[in-house]
Amino acid sequence: MKGYSGRYIRWRLDEGAVEPYDPLGDFFIQGEDGCVEERETLLDTYLVTLSEGVRRLQTEPRVPVDVVVEPYAFSLERQGTGMAVGYRGHVARIGSIDAFRADLVAAARTLVEVLDAEAARLGTEKPLMTGLREVMSFLKVPLHDAEVTGVRMDRQKQLLQLDLVLHTGEAVWLDFQGAEEWSLSGLGARNVPAPRRPAPCAFRPGSHLNPQQPCLGRPVAVQWCTNQ
């Protein structure tokens, strides 16, 4: 079964053949407290809807966002650096809007990759999914003083991926698609305060990245709940 499982967001496509233009499946948001879900729905619509809501939340304290394919709406309320996401009588409390935004980007990217691959397998055109592809460029978090904790590269796929820890302590990753040439010899930690906890593979000033030994951060354990 094809799916995605991140810090806050999880989706899984229905079993059986994948329809590139109508990705039906189950969608979940798991907060530090509470969770919301929708089953047998169009996954791309939920990702696009939430990205719109989070974008509006930058200037509005409370945001209602209709889900076009369902007779329900999300209710987003900013709470400090986090937010509360209400849906169908349930609430998921999110500790970090920045981390949720990064999760949206990763969830959208994974879905696009699955749908594009299925379209290629079927010999059909890639689905436009314009809104979903826009979500992939939605990551707008402050990278100043971010600490590089890991790197992965694939020259054949022209992909460079950096693991970062922001000044807020949130962990995100940054993708460079279509990267043909790059130089990482001078990449090191600069203007980074001492970490509050031991960080694996933390780079010291003047250190170098070894493409043969990518550094990986600690995995995050997530326990998903199901509303009854």
Image (tube, rainbow, N blue to C red):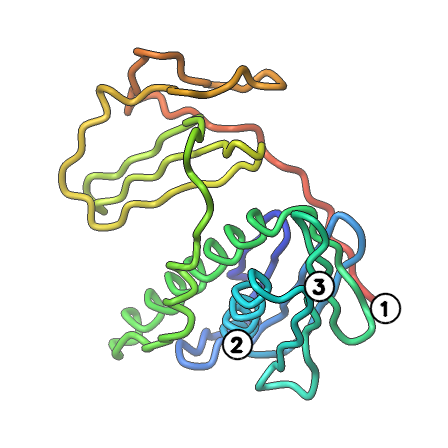
Kind of residue sitting beneath label 3: Glu
Find disc 3 in the rendering and name its residue.
77
The residue depicted at 38 percent of the width and 42 percent of the height is: 174
Quadrant of residue 180 within the rendered picture: top left
Vertical order, 198 against 184 (above or below) = above
Mark toward the viewer: 3 or 1? 3
Kind of residue sitting beneath label 1: Gln
For this rendering, which residue is in front, 168 or 149? 168
Q: Quadrant of the C terminus?
A: bottom right
Circles 2 and 1: CB distance less than 8 Å?
Answer: no
Q: What's the mark number on residue 45?
A: 2
Kind of residue sitting beneath label 2: Thr
State the SS at label 2. helix
For this rendering, which residue is in front, 58 or 124? 58
Spatial CA span between label 2 and label 3:
20 Å
Quadrant of residue 43 within the rendered picture: bottom right
